[in-house]
Amino acid sequence: MKPNFWIKICSKCFLCKYVRTSKDKTKLKYKVFNKIKLFCPICRAANYSLKKIETTHKIDFEQRYKIEIIKKTDINVVQNIKETNKKILQLLHKNHNRPSTISYYEEILTSSLRLDELKETKRNGKKIIGTFCIFVPEELIYACGAIPVRLCAGSYDTISYAEEVLPRDICPLIKSSFGFKILGLSYFELCDLVIIPTTCDGKKKLAEILNDMMPVWILELPNRKNLTKAKTFWLEEIRTLKEKLEKFTKIKITKENLKQAIKLLHQRQMIFRKLYQLKKTYPLLLNERDTLLIIQASFYDDIKRWIEKTNQLYNEVYSLTLDSKHLNSKFSTQNITTQPIKLLLTGAPIIWPNYKILNIIETTQATIVADELCSGVRSLYDTTEVDDWSTEGCLRALAYKYLLPSTCPCFTESNDRIDKLLQSIKDFSVDAVIYHSLRLCQLYDIEFYKIKTVLKNYGIPILKLHTDYSPEDTEQLKTRIEAFIEMLKNKNQLK
Amino acid sequence: MITAGIDIGSVTTKVVIIEKLNSKNYKILSQAISPTGCEPKKSAEETLKNALSKIGLSIKDLRYVISTGYGRRTIEFGNETITEITCCAKGTFWLCNNFGIKAKTIIDLGGQDTKIISLDDEGNVVDFVMNDKCAAGTGRFLEVMSNVIGINLDDFGTYYTNAKEPVKINSTCTVFAESEVISLIAQGKQKEDIIKGICDSIAERILNMLKQIEEKDVIFFCGGGAKNEGIKRALEEKLKKEIYTPQEPQFVVALGAAIIGTERYQNL
């Protein structure tokens, strides 16, 4: 019998709809006569794959006890956030040696420019997908025509609103991010969906609470990344994510669009690496605050524009290095008679506008030359290396890229992180390490002891700053940081 | 050459004026102390004037002024600001040399910060720990307790030695410990016993901080808290070794600042 006939019969069959829209019909065999009269043979043949999809597409939360979380409105918050941004920008502007292109990144982070653009794209039917941490493969999101936005927030102003739902004693990053949702502000409100990796207890439970307000997907991370079991499991998670995304956006992730997305992100990482390499030779070209500004603009911005602007920035900064006069004047304006103290920043994420400790450090006679933050260099450094461009090959490469080079303390072992730190210390000839630890972020806090001991054996001094987003301990931090730098200066002079 | 060190702490402002005699010897010309209050700038100026008037000098006679402590950036007439940690190390090193001891670890119990500083043989800071922003284990804790019991901090030492059945204060938080002490008073506990409990509790906090750095021998105890005999004894009991306290523990940081001032002036 001809397939047309069945399609007529099956017009009410929802399976057919699925088969007709998404499966290549020619591949199906029509020979088998269907004993179940409701379903045509096409559907019967498709039944197997559909079952698979159904099981994998089961919603992440059963929501048997859905609660209503009442949103807050407060006009003052918007004003407060604006003022905080303004204050920090003013501090940044005190440094006169910044490249001019940097104002673009400032605009992305502080103005509503990008937000309005995203609203417009959303109206045109594009999906906006929120992510947390750096474990969600952005390539997959781009491949199915959606736009990823990283929602990890650094704003102190929203915390008190989040505390009406979340407990006081969890990390400020989670509270701050959730605050944006409960207030209905910023990028969070635009997201059609949020993907949360299970990187810590806070994120896991945030997911459940958030799920009562919007669709949330969980990306389950293994605890031991080096196990073969774990790799297989993670690859399966990525595969499921791909299928879920296809269903959600109704766009199939093909070999071609996935390849395109991987290449696009590759391009982004490469331009950033170029900039980072330049910083290795000229640590004073860009300070850490500006580096984070550049990196964190990429959390929100249109990726193509970001690449273009960063290329521009690279060229601008590179031309400065050719002009040795400028470099000399840089030294003199900062009143550095001797070599500045070179610091490496590591630990819990520092996210705009939480520039508290950066502002203190960079107004002393020290400069942060490198960082090992998931909100910093780590988020743009690793590239996806594909050797087999089939869809499966791409997925495998993606899965490994997001899992294996990660130095997140959510894994049981910290060896990779220590390797990376020691490498950066060598590469950038770092004098000392600053360890940023957020209150109630236990993972980073626990890893401190081991890292401190290892680094001490290598003769690298380390200072732990245990703090949160609130500005109340600024003075204490100042004393601590200044004393540390005085100590290092003294040590350098003795050499 | 005459220099001054101004230590603007959270509770008191201290000024030390020194004169350099020869390469390693300084003479303390004058010192003054006054409460910081809510106008650190004014208090710093007045304390300095006070110290200067004792020896009949004026600000012009000072070659170098270094300000340190919490309010170090509030004054305008200083040549440089340096943190109290570096200054404390400097002051301790000089004082200890005079006494003929080599201090390796400093406990500085201040008004709102407690610092543990580790020194090398030349008196350079090798490592340091500071308490978190909370007031537990600081001078503020002592002040609050002294108010609750109604006994002057200077008398804590005598009460400490007279304790018969010392109580244990379990709360580290100042606010909780306050209500704990109030309930102990209500239970009819002896003041002596409570005071020993308070001193032990602070010593415990300091010991915890000591564990975070390599604790080396010869411990030097300074800052306003070192005036308190009770805490010194509690620390000695727990560490099972002698602790050195200078005659005027509050001036160590300001003295260190003045010494650094001389060094800086010579390097100019």
Image: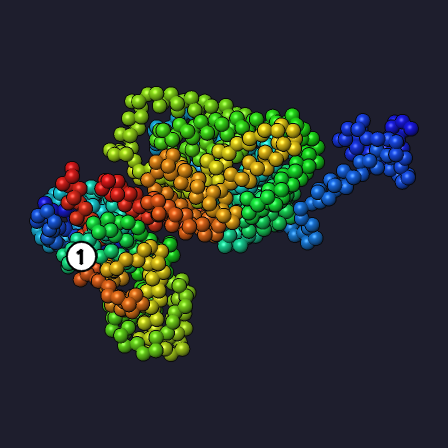
Residue A113 visible? The answer is no
Position in image of residue B198 (x %, y %): 34, 68
Disc 1 marks a residue whose amino acid type is Cys
Quadrant (top left, top right, bottom left, bottom right) of the N terminus of chain A:
top right
Taking the spot 46% from the left edge, 37% from the top edge, the residue there is: A376
Q: Is residue A417 left or right of residue B136?
A: right
Q: Nearer the viewer, residue A305 or B151?
A: A305
Identify the image's colour scheme: rainbow, by chain, secondary structure or one colour.
rainbow
Taking the spot 26% from the left edge, 59% from the top edge, the residue there is: B217
Position in image of residue A375 (x %, y %): 48, 39
In the rendered image, which quarter is residue A340 located in? top left
Taking the spot 42% from the left edge, 33% from the top edge, the residue there is: A291
Q: Is residue B80 left or right of residue A256?
A: left
Q: Which residue is denoted by mark 1 in the rendering?
A: B96
Q: Is residue B62 left or right of residue A85?
A: left
Residue A300 visible? The answer is yes
Label total for image: 1
Position in image of residue A37 (x %, y %): 91, 39
Taking the spot 34% from the left edge, 42% from the top edge, the residue there is: A432
Quadrant (top left, top right, bottom left, bottom right) of the C terminus of chain A:
top left
